[in-house]
Image: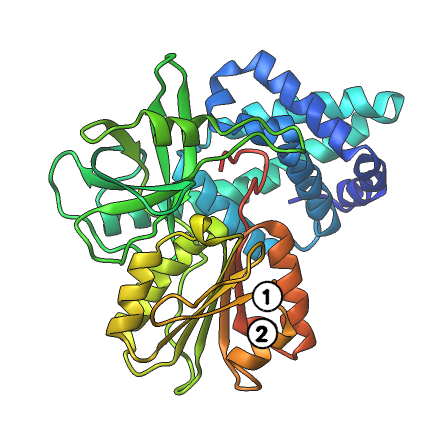
Amino acid sequence: MLSERQTATIKATAPALEACGETLARDMYARMFKNNPEVKPYFNPAHQQSGRQQRALASAVCAYAQYVDNPAALADAVELIANKHVSLGILPEHYPVVGKNLLESIKAVMGDAATPEVIDAWAAAYAELADIFIAREHALYDAKQQRYGWTGLKPFVVARREAVSDNIVSLYLEPEDGAPLAAHRPGQYVAVHTTLPNGATALRNYSLSNAPGTPYYRISVKRELASSDDAPAGVFSHYAHDELAVGDRVRLSPPCGEFTLAPSAQAGRPLVLMAGGVGITPLLSMLHAALAAEPERRVILIQAVRNEALRPFADELAELARLHPNFELHIRYSEEKPQAAPEAAQASRGFIDDALLNAVIGETPADYYFCGPNPMLAHVCRLLDARGVAAEHMHYEFFGPADSLEAA
């Protein structure tokens, strides 16, 4: 436990580290990849190049400093990050690697201000935080072993490929040993590990888009192009689209993640799912589960896409709408005016806004789950907050780096 003096030192120096947070994070990653190249495969190079990983680490350091004397306040963040770590196979021996390089970077960035007392306080704080993560991750590993029958990475075979839009391909993955698969919780993801043709390895997280209880896991991969924020084209996504073939072998972690569909707590309360682009993947698994478990519950999916060519799972959603009269599908196109709504669906042009929600759900209290690009998440949160939706009825998935040891 931190002493009062160490706690005071952390809080006193946190503003200085916050001011140079991204510089600190860039120095730490560069230092760690040089000193400990064995950890580099755990990190997504696109997030490194764009700066997203550095910003995530800087935010994590500042958040911990703010709550250093009340770590229980970070329980939700710890759960999110611990699940990411377990999916990637992070182990207790990885924590000293990050800690050593982080402390060296604090010394480099703070200069003379990084006195022995300051470094001692941050070392103690990091050790305490590492202990919290290690304990939670140990419990999660045990739970994965009991539910799914394995931890770490297990060999799977690509049994089928299916293009579900112009930029998304679904891969149906079956366990190489033929063992039955325990049903995942709708909304969870897996880590996918593969060796690329050039000998490099890739380790990425992908949501499971299949209905729970199928004899396969399905991931649906968007082809990631180079972006304006200097992120390079997605290495694994291009490999999955262009080279990964039926019969090829990958390795998967057990399903992880806390963005999962909860049973309806109140009878008659509709379920509203809002998906932006490839963000539909965890929501599609939730949709299948909700329709199977609660066939009388009103379920609404608002699918926001740029145009029809980029709308994934059109046939699957049309079939679900045909089979389930309690399911309502509304498609929102941002780039084109729909000529006619697809069968068993409504369609309109624009973005998700208050007028759309008024038309689709009105003032009826509902449970909301949404997933998509980060600007969409922020926009929908503001929209629902303005409509008076309580936080406990808003559930969303953040796609991107969650902390310093995360490669999604």
* Tag 2 residue: 356
Residue type for callout 2? Leu
- Pinpoint residue 91: horizontal percent, then vertical percent: 43, 32
User: Which residue is labeled 1 in the image?
Assistant: 352
Residue 273 falls left or right of residue 390: left
Judge the density around disc 2: few (<14), some (14-19), many (≥20) Cα neighbours within 10 Å: some
Is 253 positioned to the left or the right of 333 in the image? Answer: left
> How many labels were placed on the picture?
2
One can see residue 185 in this view: no
Left or right of 110 on screen, residue 43: left
Picture quarter with the N terminus: top right
Q: Give the percent coordinates (x, y) of residue 213.
A: 21, 57
Q: CA distance from mark 1 to mark 2?
A: 6 Å
Crowd class of label 1 (few under 14; some 14 to 19; many from 20; radius 10 Å): many
Q: Is residue 37 visible?
A: yes
Q: Residue at x 65, y 18 (%)?
A: 30
Q: How far across and how far down the image is residue 373, in percent?
A: 57, 50
Q: Residue at horizontal 65%, vertical 30%?
A: 50
Task: Please give left or right for residue 182 compared with residue 270 in the image.
Answer: left
In the image shown, does 156 or 315 lie closer to the viewer?
315
Residue 295 figure quarter: bottom left
Name the residue at the right extreme.
112
Q: Secondary structure at mark 2?
A: helix
Asked if 363 appears above or below 251 in the picture, the reply is below
Asked if the residues shown at circle 1 and circle 2 are in contact, with their CB atoms under 8 angstroms apart, the answer is yes
The single residue placed furthest to the front in the displayed view is 339
- The amino acid at mark 1 is Ile
| Residue 217 marker | none
Asked which quadrant contains residue 76, the reply is bottom right
